[in-house]
Amino acid sequence: MPSVASIESACLAALRGAGLSEEFAQVQLSLLLEAELRGTTSHGLLRLPRVVERIISGATDPASPGKGTWRGTALLEVDGEQGLGPIVAKFALDQVTQRATTCGVAVAAIRNCDHLGMLAWYAEQVAKKGQILIALTISEALVHPWGGRQAMLGTNPIAIGVPSEPEPFVLDMATSLVSMGKIHDHANRGMPIPLGWALDANGTPTTNASAAKDGSIAPFGGAKGYALGLAFELLVTALTASATGRDVKGTLDPVHPCNKGDVFIVLEPAHAVGPVISQFMNEIRNCPPADPSSPVRVPGDRALSTRANRLDQDVCLAPETWKRIQQLAGIN
Amino acid sequence: MPSVASIESACLAALRGAGLSEEFAQVQLSLLLEAELRGTTSHGLLRLPRVVERIISGATDPASPGKGTWRGTALLEVDGEQGLGPIVAKFALDQVTQRATTCGVAVAAIRNCDHLGMLAWYAEQVAKKGQILIALTISEALVHPWGGRQAMLGTNPIAIGVPSEPEPFVLDMATSLVSMGKIHDHANRGMPIPLGWALDANGTPTTNASAAKDGSIAPFGGAKGYALGLAFELLVTALTASATGRDVKGTLDPVHPCNKGDVFIVLEPAHAVGPVISQFMNEIRNCPPADPSSPVRVPGDRALSTRANRLDQDVCLAPETWKRIQQLAGIN
């Protein structure tokens, strides 16, 4: 397995080769590598080839940081101008985190920007600097409404970051029951999926992972999870005037300009509330567990322990991903 | 069954008798009656006696609209000074909806205020006037963490209102699998509850509704719903410096001053986005249904149809609730 240093070097070469500046390449890599280190493989380095392919096809502009306009004292409207997700997002976050220090709250409403990647990355950065973040984003339609038979909604994740010591609280979850990546993974291994995860293209419940790839994923938590995913999609659309449902393009494919919306809400916490948050998180961890061998976890605990282990070791990259990254970097 | 007019008249008499001004009594009644009409019985008129009892015990101040201080241009910190939920909330919402028109976003961070009641009421009012609302509130600890055996979290609901025609989109849902009211209802009727709804006081899964009353309710949607409920509780606490977990008091009982927090985030939508929202909601309703006899619903659809039916008829009040309200009103 390659070392983290050699992976970094190849990825940066591939991104620079696609037209990213040194600064932008560092930001894009940092996001993907962080997802890899935390075990969020679906949002890790396997996405790098697609980032490059989208630039080559002309769907993505590797040099655009987006264009921001204040629609009110505390609401920044951002046209991403087809820039890269983490570049446009960082540009927007820099402005709204600054504005929130005087306004108490500030919001970025972003459209025409590529896939943001792992939302936890943004939530952690903001919370580490002492502010609260609510992040919402939309994906292509992959999820069926509760009681429906067709993909109509994105996987519509939410991330929430809250400052605390020693580590901030970070939630990052999709409103789908599982990710499409997980279904692809089962299909690739020829494994069945549990009944209830997905419907096939005809809207019939299936355990065949390959059939599910052309169908739709269930929302998490039944009717409530569906309701929440729909509410997030409507809220993001209402704020950003972005596309909805089956009209959303460009979050996964290599060729379509991305037309989904993203929303960041940054909030200033009350004074000196940090220790209360940490203490409550520890109380939760100390809740008597149903299974004595499985202590109660707080969201983010597993990602941080995975990260701590992986930093000591090499990153476990799939051979075909590593080969493709080396090709794009012009190595071998 | 009593008519809506006679119920209104008795409720107003009971509230005025407890010290509410005519204006405050109208607001408090309007909230409870609206919940009743929509079929959210758990947040309906059965709550009125408790509102009065809390005033009599001194836990609630029926005359306080709360005291607001702007912690930033767009963040209103509200000390509810133990006022009634809908009174303090209305006072706060009036200010932040106004401020959002120039700032694009404004937030109310409320503490020391009684139970807000049905959040849909606030979301609908704000959305009908053309703004987006995200409302969060905390309850006493009733929900166990995923993998835990003890109640540590509130039922922590979220409401989201988005403007659209002819009716706004309104989501209002708890992050618990069911309400404690539903478990009490099963206990009162001597009915068992499904396995998975709740644990008894020892943390053991139970189908005995009476045993569940002293135990804890499951979060909705397993680990994800738990994570979301916890994130909401941390976010609200961080913004309002209110109590957390098992320290939260006064949302249900008759004697404790209420120490939970509430958060309203009001956002200005992008220009002329309303028709897009309505169209997407209709596309969702027209999604091919899994069961041809059950069309896909959008959150709020059922509440509005219940409301339309009930307005033509009498409100279906439990006899003991009606008797208690008449007593409090000094009737018979």
Image (cartoon, coloured by chain):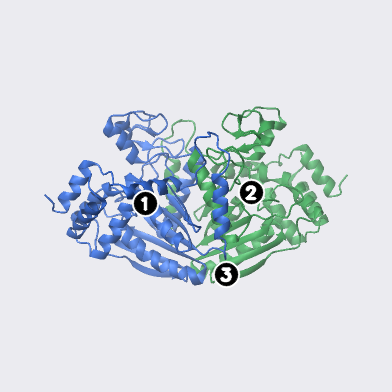
Chain colours: A green, B blue
Vertically, is B50 above or below B239?
Answer: above
Question: Residue A139, which numbered label?
Answer: 2
CA–CA distance in space, label 1 to label 2: 31 Å
Secondary structure of the residue carrying numbered label 2: loop
Secondary structure of the residue carrying numbered label 1: loop
Number of other residues with Cα within 10 Å of mark 2, as a class: few under 14, some 14 to 19, many 20 or more? many
Q: Is residue B273 left or right of residue B40?
A: right
Residue A25, by quadrant, is bottom right
**What is the three-letter code of the residue carrying label 1?**
Met
Give me the chain letter of mark 2.
A
- Residue B168 at least partly seen: yes
- As drawn, which residue projects farthest toward the front? B312
Q: Is residue B12 left or right of residue A268?
A: left
Tell me which numbered mark, 3 or 2, is placed earlier along the sequence: 3
Q: Residue at x 29, y 58 (%)?
A: B28
Number of other residues with Cα within 10 Å of mark 1, as a class: few under 14, some 14 to 19, many 20 or more? many
Question: Residue A71, which numbered label?
Answer: 3
Give me the chain letter of mark 3.
A
- As drawn, which residue projects farthest toward the left? B332
Q: Position of residue A86 (x, y in %)?
A: 67, 57
Is there CB contact under 8 Å for labels 1 and 2? no
Give me the chain letter of mark 1.
B
Vertically, is A187 above or below A24?
Answer: above
Task: Name the residue beneath numbered marker 1.
Answer: B118
Q: Residue at x 73, y 60 (%)?
A: A24
